Image (spheres, rainbow, N blue to C red):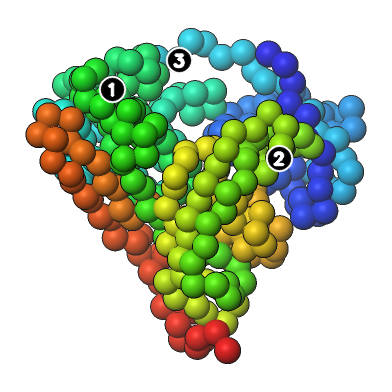
Amino acid sequence: MNPIQLVITEEMASKRLDKVLSEALEDFSRNYLQILIDEKLITVNGKVAKASFKCKCGDVVEIELKETEEIEAVPQNLNLDVVYEDSDVIVVNKPKGMVVHPGPGNPDGTLVNGLLHHCTDLSGINGVLRPGIVHRIDKDTTGLIVACKNDKAHESLADQLMLKTASRKYLALVHGVMPHEFGTIDAPIGRDEKDRQKMAVTAKNSKNAVTHFKVVERFQDATLMECSLETGRTHQIRVHMQYIGYPIVGDPKYSLRKTRNDTQGQMLHAFELTFVHPSTKKAMTFHAPLPEYFEQILIELREKGAAK
């Protein structure tokens, strides 16, 4: 495997190496990263570093990925929050911290592992590691995701997402007071040339990305916004909000501001999902309430008063 290179930025400086890695490499579990550190597969400026190493701006971290055994998705009872289920589809309210499908550093404990325990069948179009999965949401993004139980349903949902007849709406708490009531961000997204673990608005090797937003509530130094996706690029809402200067509160990867430490991840929730049922052809809309920690932070912000 090719090593990953990470250059420590100003906002990463003074943090422990293990914390920097867990924030920058969110596709890998903390346990997996700790194994790499213990096995001396991570260096800083060419020297083996401990987990407690304090990073400095400009440090070059090189991560040599450990060859892993072939991953097999196994059923696990994860007590999924099932919002709806029939013979074609299953809609789940995904909790924070749950990865959608297995991968390096996340061999189990994923949504797919839970689905394999809960369902007797899932579509096989995306292979053994992503059965039934037609779209994803980030590990620390909460909310609604639909999976399919057969290939016919999978093809139908995939077509709806491609043709934009299925819709996904999110609630996002962002830094700053947004002056506009609504707007559209139309900016292409691709890999960040300086940090391959991040996405960015860029003209190089990018795909078109469109996010619509409207203000739900304003606070003294933050705004609750409803965002809807016209496209489904990796980290799309997170990247677009950073691009326009209103990064998502708690986002360890894209928020450049000092942020609350009680969010444990970005304040982004997929609260509404609409699609046409693959068999009945009827439009179906599902909703998921905000997680308790998200509601509590909104309560605290309201107590401080509205934006002036």
Q: Earlier in the sequence, mark 3 or mark 1?
A: 3
Between marks 3 and 1 in the image, the one whose residue lies nearer the viewer: 1
Element class at badge 3: loop
Q: Residue at x 55, y 72 (%)?
A: 180
Q: Residue at x 35, y 60 (%)?
A: 291
Q: Report if residue 264 is visible in the image.
A: no
Residue 191 at x, y percent in the picture = 67, 33
Between marks 2 and 3 in the image, the one whose residue lies nearer the viewer: 2
Q: Is residue 168 left or right of residue 251?
A: left
Residue 64 at x, y percent in the picture = 73, 21
Residue 28 at x, y percent in the picture = 57, 32
* Badge number at residue 202: 2
Q: Amino acid at mark 3?
A: Ile
In the displayed structure, 149 sits above or below 255; it is: above
Residue 23 at x, y percent in the picture = 64, 45
- Give the camera-side residue of 244 and 250: 244
Quarter location, residue 92: top left
Q: Earlier in the sequence, mark 2 or mark 1?
A: 1
What residue is disc 1 on? 155
Q: Is residue 171 left or right of residue 186?
A: left
Element class at badge 1: helix
Query: What's the distance in space between the residues labelled 2 and 3, CA to CA?
Result: 33 Å
Quarter location, residue 261: bottom right
- Do the residues bearing badges 2 and 3 touch, measured as CB atoms within 8 Å? no
Quarter location, residue 104: top right
Q: Is residue 18 left or right of residue 109?
A: right
In the displayed structure, 11 sits above or below 262; it is: above
In the displayed structure, 68 sits above or below 299; it is: above
Element class at badge 2: loop
What residue is disc 3 on? 71
- Give the camera-side residue of 59 and 168: 168
Query: What's the distance in space between the residues labelled 3 and 1, CA to CA?
Result: 25 Å
